[in-house]
Amino acid sequence: MARPADLDLAVALADRADQPADWYGLGRRTLGPLVLVLVRGDADFRLVGRGRVPSWGAGWTMPAARFVVIRADGEDPFRVLRHELAHVILHQAARGRLPLWFDEGYAVLAAGEFGRFERLQLNVTVARGRVPGLGELSNALRADRSTADAAYGLAGSAVAFLAERTPSRSLAPVLDRIARGIPFDSAVLLGTGLNAGRFEEAWQRTIKRRHGLGLWLGAGGMWIGVAVLVILAHYLRRRRDRPRREALDVGWDVSTSDESDPDTTDRA
């Protein structure tokens, strides 16, 4: 569904959605039939979303209904399509409820967006001295845009960390268990050996370690470090040159007479 002016783009998006594709942790899959709606402008986006999605969004999905909405005038519509289809394919594979942070983090990774969110906002919460818990993270995903951008990056990092903690360093073991109807927390425990609380703590520690230094550099720490190195180099050079300067001073006398030229010195 699209306005006449956007029909070509709508057809191209529909063709992309109809193609089999490889999905993170799930392998090659075909989506099957779905409803794809292409809208343009804030008013149409709010109308179709019925006020249930943030106005700054570029797309949204009802996975169970296989209903996908993309903004033609938003971000790259093909990248947004990939993100929204990731929700559909994940819910098509999973049985049972999934936490929002996992749902959105999976879509971020599946759409290849993690680097973008990481560059933009991932270090913001680390700058404030803390990383939110996963429950807080789910709430932040529905906040204002700047908060949500940070939350999307953190959600992607949490899903990537979950994959790293499995023996195969893949998300597949967790997704396989979810597909068999094992509850999410149990699937994480069986796949990583960590219960929900320990997984959250391990992820928070990893985020602080990985991104603390990067944030410090980005916030100006790099220039402080450069200044310290310049001062240190100057001090070491003066210390190294001190014997030579003292040797040059031997036998020299600078007259203090009022009649002397201040720009000249006389050799004794």
Image (cartoon, rainbow, N blue to C red):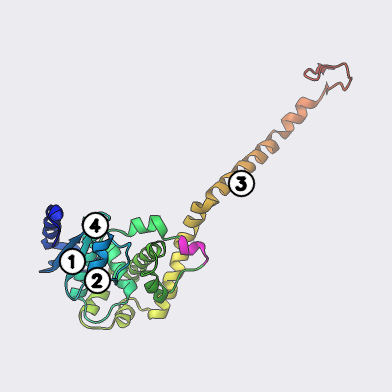
Nearer-the-camera pick, 55 or 17: 55
Numbered disc 2: secondary structure: helix
Earlier in the chain: of badge 4 and badge 3, it is 4
Q: Position of residue 103 (x, y in %)?
A: 29, 71
Amino acid type, mark 1: Gly
Amino acid type, mark 2: Ala
Residue 127 is one of the magenta-drawn residues: yes
Numbered disc 3: secondary structure: helix
Q: State how far apart marks 1 and 3 are (Cα).
A: 50 Å
Is residue 53 shown to the viewer in this render?
Answer: yes
Q: State how far apart marks 3 and 2 are (Cα).
A: 47 Å
Nearer-the-camera pick, 48 or 138: 48
Nearer-the-camera pick, 256 or 5: 5
Disc 3: which residue = 228
Amino acid type, mark 3: Val
Res. 145 image quadrant: bottom left
Q: Is residue 24 left or right of residue 212?
A: left
For the magenta stretch, what is the residue range?
124-129
Q: State how far apart marks 4 and 1 are (Cα).
A: 19 Å
Q: Nearer the viewer, mark 4 or mark 2?
A: 4
Numbered disc 1: secondary structure: strand
Earlier in the chain: of badge 4 and badge 2, it is 4
Disc 2: which residue = 172
Earlier in the chain: of badge 1 and badge 3, it is 1
Numbered disc 4: secondary structure: helix
Residue 164 is one of the magenta-drawn residues: no
